[in-house]
Amino acid sequence: MDNDVVLLDHGSGGKLSQDLVRKVFLRLLEGKSLRDLDDGAPFQAPGTNLVTTTDSFVVDPLFFPGGDIGHLAVCGTVNDLAASGAEPLCLTAAFILEEGFSLRDLEDIVSSMVETAREAGVRIVAGDTKVVPRGKADGVFINTTGVGAVISRNPIGGRHVLPGDRVLISGTVGDHGVAILAARAALSLHTPVRSDARPLWGLTKAMLQSGAEIHALRDPTRGGLAAALNEIAFQSEVGIEIDESSVPCRTEVRTACDLLGLDPLVLANEGKMLVMVKREDADAVLETMKRHPDGAEARCIGRAVPSHSGRVVMRTAIGGTRLLDMPTGEAWPRIC
């Protein structure tokens, strides 16, 4: 961090985001759960193990094909709890509203949150509202905090991945990122792309109840699949190898990425789950995923290896290999 100010790239989910977290927040804040760098922090209450997570949403535009900021806020928080092996129990929601924001739009956003929470089986139990002067918030920002009860039979987190583990993804990558970019830039795509934003607890619960030894779960949001894989490789000090031809991606998403000069592997997803599972259990988990509507397009895309610790290597479609590095910067901020 050579700069003395916050840059937009610090919010990208890539290298500068990691630098900001490690050199400011982890240096000044204490706690093992913070240092683990997972999607949720475990804590104990009498008779149960719980997880909590918090997130903020600043997407632009607020309404997009396949969802809106309210739908996104609930999905994102529920999915972070699910990625910690926890059943979502309740959420809080805090709103920062800009003076002059449409009350009709606010009602639509809150109604969307209620509907999505009902679909996910979670309650919104508390909230807060602040209003700032016109021009200070760009409509509405939402912060959500969630609490869930752990149901996984073994610890789940990025540091638990072992060499030999298989890498599974629940469906196509880049859908949310392209949907947002197309809406923001008013791109007229031959086949419109909708955001994949959805709550994934049902799919995750089915995997956890299968009896398989799942070591890590991650919803690859900011920074996409590339960032999520690099985070896990760093946490567990393993290498990860993936096959480019095995990563599912819609034709219309690839076309849009070619048009915009983007890589679908670094674009945000809001309805996909990355799974690191013991090799012997991988086939059973994959079949479980495919039987669920939210995992019908699931694939095995790679494995964890003892070599090139902390790095992700991709075998390309033409037979070569290249380093799939942590994304640097973000050309399109406010994606989620």
Image (cartoon, helix red, strand yellow):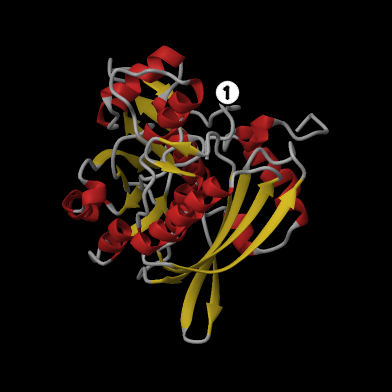
Residue 11, position as x, y percentages in the image: 63, 37
Q: Is residue 308 visible?
A: no
177 to 69, vertically: above or below: above
Q: Quadrant of the N terminus?
A: top right
Residue 145, position as x, y percentages in the image: 57, 61
Q: Is residue 75 visible?
A: yes
Which residue is pictured at 50% across the width and 21% down the height? 185
Which residue is pictured at 78% across the width and 55% down the height? 28
Which of the 4 image quarters holds residue 99? top right
**Is 135 or 333 nearer to us in this picture?**
135
Q: What type is the residue that disc 1 sits on?
A: Ala
Find numbered disc 1 in the image and state the secondary structure of the residue it sits on.
loop
Residue 284, position as x, y percentages in the image: 18, 55
Residue 279, position as x, y percentages in the image: 26, 50
Which of the 4 image quarters holds residue 251? top left
Within 10 angstroms of label 1, few (less than 14), some, or many (20 or more) residues? Answer: few
Please state if 232 lies on the left or on the right of 1 as rendered: left
**Is 25 or 60 nearer to us in this picture?**
60
Please state if 134 lies on the left or on the right of 74 as rendered: right
What residue did someone put label 1 on?
A: 331
